[in-house]
Image (tube, rainbow, N blue to C red):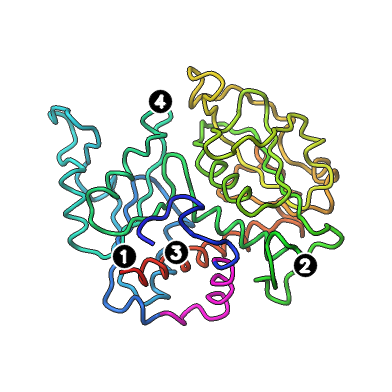
């Protein structure tokens, strides 16, 4: 595997989930693969789980790790072509990228959407330059439009909390014996991605990838959000949106709450804007009562009182911490495959 951005890059999901279980049982089993190999993690934006989980995964695999914060301790980088660099940016990404490639074997890139130019963001301008010019395998640690490490971890988590007879997820659960299982949810778990209000304009990367991976997993998947917040068909296909949040929640086994700013699909002029602040979409106890004893999920960090209420995120049905822990596992599988391909 030379690049990792979309669900198609990982190959058959059952095989990827089996590798996740294998690594979860023995996180140091493949330590020999990373011996004398170096991972470079490049951050254009802040991070907590991605930074810690990716570095831990690399260390588990025996790798050396270099972390570069582009906005703290490095030259400011120009990303546009054809500009006169007479401002505060001292180095162009087109020189910086091949230099970075000289010092490592694999590169992870984190670069958020600017939310002002949809065409620029959805072209994945920054990460594609790393893929083209670094000469190294590149994986996304969240980009303008996708967050595949999070979505893979989400799928692992859903498998853990789904009965092992589910044909869409297949086989035995990755869960440890002490973890609970959903009862009576049927062969196909119902998974709901719900928009929730937020005080800031956020990118669509997490919901894009979550939708993409859930469709590939063939769960009973439903998306619910206010009208006008439709995600790009590139990621959600022709799946029907349920605009009635209560109807979407009915019988759900998993509720995945996430805010995203307007994707600009129906109205390009709204791209990156907050066009709804409807607080009735906040996930509270009443919302969860509509589900089939559903589990609450979120990628974190989460704004309490906006996305979700305290009683829901602190309830026994909240699985946000096991979900975050699985970020180490999803990244381990990706790095393992990249190391094997070197």
Residue shown at 63% from the left, 63% from the top: 322
Q: CA distance from mark 3 to mark 4?
A: 31 Å
Tell me, yes or no, whether the two marked residues, 2 and 1, touch with CB atoms within 8 Å.
no
User: Magenta segment range?
Assistant: 16-30
Tell me, yes or no, whether the two marked residues, 4 and 1, touch with CB atoms within 8 Å.
no
In the rendered structure, does residue 267 fall within the stretch colored magenta?
A: no
Q: Which quarter of the figure has residue 283?
A: top right
User: Residue 196: percent from the left, percent from the top?
Assistant: 66, 36
The answer to whether 201 appears left or right of 217 in the picture is left
Q: Which residue is mark 2?
A: 165
Circle 2 sits in a helix, a strand or a loop, which is it? loop
Q: Earlier in the sequence, mark 4 or mark 1?
A: 1
Residue shown at 73% from the left, 75% from the top: 178
Q: Give the foreground label among 4 and 2.
A: 2
Q: Which residue is mark 4?
A: 116
Q: CA distance from mark 4 to mark 1?
A: 31 Å
Q: Which disc is residue 334 wearing?
A: 3
Q: Is residue 21 above or below residue 78?
A: below
């Amino acid at each position: 595997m030379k690049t990792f951005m979309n669900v198609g890059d990982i190959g058959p999901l059952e095989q990827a989930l089996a590798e996740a279980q294998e690594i979860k049982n023995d996180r140091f089993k493949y330590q020999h693969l990373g011996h004398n190999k170096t991972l470079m993690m490049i951050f254009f934006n802040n991070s907590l789980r991605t930074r810690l989980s990716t570095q831990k995964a690399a260390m588990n695999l025996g790798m050396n790790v270099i972390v570069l914060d582009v906005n703290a301790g490095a030259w400011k980088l120009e990303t546009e072509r054809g500009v006169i660099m007479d401002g505060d940016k001292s180095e162009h990404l087109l020189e910086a990228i091949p230099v970075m490639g000289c010092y490592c074997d694999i590169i992870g890139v984190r670069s958020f959407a600017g939310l002002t130019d949809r065409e620029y963001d959805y072209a994945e301008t920054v990460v594609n330059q790393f893929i083209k010019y670094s000469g190294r395998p590149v994986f996304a640690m969240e980009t303008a439009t996708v967050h595949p490490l999070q979505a893979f971890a989400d799928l692992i988590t859903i498998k853990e909390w789904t009965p092992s007879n589910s044909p869409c997820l297949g086989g035995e659960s990755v869960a440890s014996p002490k973890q609970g299982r959903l009862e009576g949810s049927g062969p196909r778990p119902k998974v709901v991605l719900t928009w929730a209000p937020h005080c800031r304009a956020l990118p669509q990367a997490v919901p894009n990838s979550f939708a993409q991976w859930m469709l590939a997993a063939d769960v009973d998947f439903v998306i619910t959000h206010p009208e006008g917040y439709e995600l790009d068909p590139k990621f959600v296909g022709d799946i029907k949106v349920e605009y009635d949040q209560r109807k979407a929640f009915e019988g759900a086994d998993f509720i995945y709450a996430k805010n995203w700013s307007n994707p600009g699909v129906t109205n390009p002029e709204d791209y990156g804007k907050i066009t709804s602040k409807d607080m009735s979409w906040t996930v509270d106890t009443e919302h969860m009562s509509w589900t089939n004893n559903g589990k609450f999920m979120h990628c974190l960090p989460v704004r309490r009182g906006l996305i979700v209420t305290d009683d829901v995120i602190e309830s026994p049905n909240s699985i946000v911490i096991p979900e975050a822990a699985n970020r180490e596992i999803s990244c381990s599988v990706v790095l393992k495959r990249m190391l094997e391909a070197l």
